[in-house]
Image (cartoon, grey):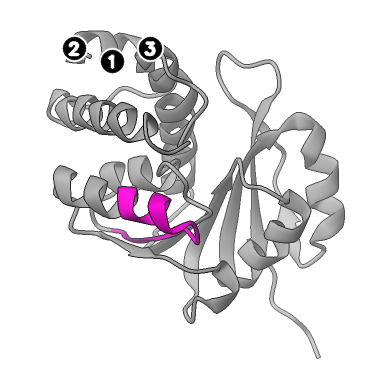
Amino acid sequence: MDTPSIARLLEPYIQLDESQLPAISKYIDLLLKWNARINLTAIREPEEIVQRHFGESFFAASHILAMGEIWTAIDLGSGAGFPGVPFAMLAPQVSVTLIEAHQKKATFLRELVFSLGLKNIKVFSDRGEKYPDRADIVTMRAVESFEDALPVAVNLVDISGKVALLIGSSQVEAAEKLCNSVKWENPLGVPRSDFRTLLIGTKMVKVG
């Protein structure tokens, strides 16, 4: 996909430097190649991939980065790499870990990271419960068993760190009820979507 088209499709979400666009084109080509072999995404049209996957991911990343300094990030259940890889592309100073227990998807992620030359990403190919470290920000998007995965995501957040969820608006109430250790911000609607939401919360310090 040509870079001017990518830039145009991303305009409602973010404005990127022209130097960042070829990597997105390369990412799309690799994603479509691998998607023919394993199910990475149900979306197969490049234009829709740019808007639904990249647009949503960059929208979230720009809001997260505007909230303060971040040095470490975890993307739980990374799958095809969203939003973790776009986050890493936008913030090369942040050390990003992609957690993906599905081995073939983890292999795709490793090839993607190598192909794009992203030095600030590592892939952890096991369950989130087994990851030994914590991060300033943990992201999660389109994971299976949301209610089981959310407590795992929150556990991976450092005290006073943040969790960022790209979810449907109908899931916001469930998220707020599941995790009372998190102080949630007001949800933000994703551009060009009637139901997609960015929900960000801060992990509170335990007392006693």
Percent from the top left, x then y, of residue 36? 37, 29
Q: CA distance from mark 1 to mark 3?
A: 8 Å
Disc 2 on helix, strand or loop? loop
Disc 1 on helix, strand or loop? helix
Pick the residue in front: 15 or 132: 132
- Tag count: 3
Question: Which amino acid type is marked by label 1?
Answer: Ile
For marks 2 and 3 on the same chain, the one whose residue lies earlier in the sequence = 2
Question: Which amino acid type is marked by label 2?
Answer: Asp
Percent from the top left, x then y, of residue 13? 44, 22
201 is higher (above) or lower (below) than 95: above
Say which residue label 2 marks.
2
Pick the residue in front: 204 or 6: 6
Pick the residue in front: 181 or 40: 40
Q: Which mark is residue 47?
A: 3
Q: Which residues are magenta?
A: 94-108
Horizontal relation, residue 91 to residue 63: left or right: left
Q: Residue at x 19, y 30 (%)?
A: 26
Question: Which amino acid type is marked by label 3?
Answer: Glu
Q: CA distance from mark 2 to mark 3?
A: 11 Å
For marks 1 and 3 on the same chain, the one whose residue lies earlier in the sequence = 1
Percent from the top left, x then y, of residue 19? 12, 29
Which quadrant of the figure contains the N terminus?
A: top left
Q: Is 69 one of the magenta-colored residues?
A: no
The mark closer to the camera, 1 or 3, is 3
Which residue of the protein is positioned furthest toward the bottom in this rendering?
208
72 is higher (above) or lower (below) than 20: below
Q: Residue at x 44, y 54 (%)?
A: 68
Which residue of the protein is positioned furthest toward the front in this rendering?
37
Say which residue label 1 marks.
6
Disc 3 on helix, strand or loop? helix
Q: Residues within 10 Å of mark 3 (few under 14, many from 20)?
A: some
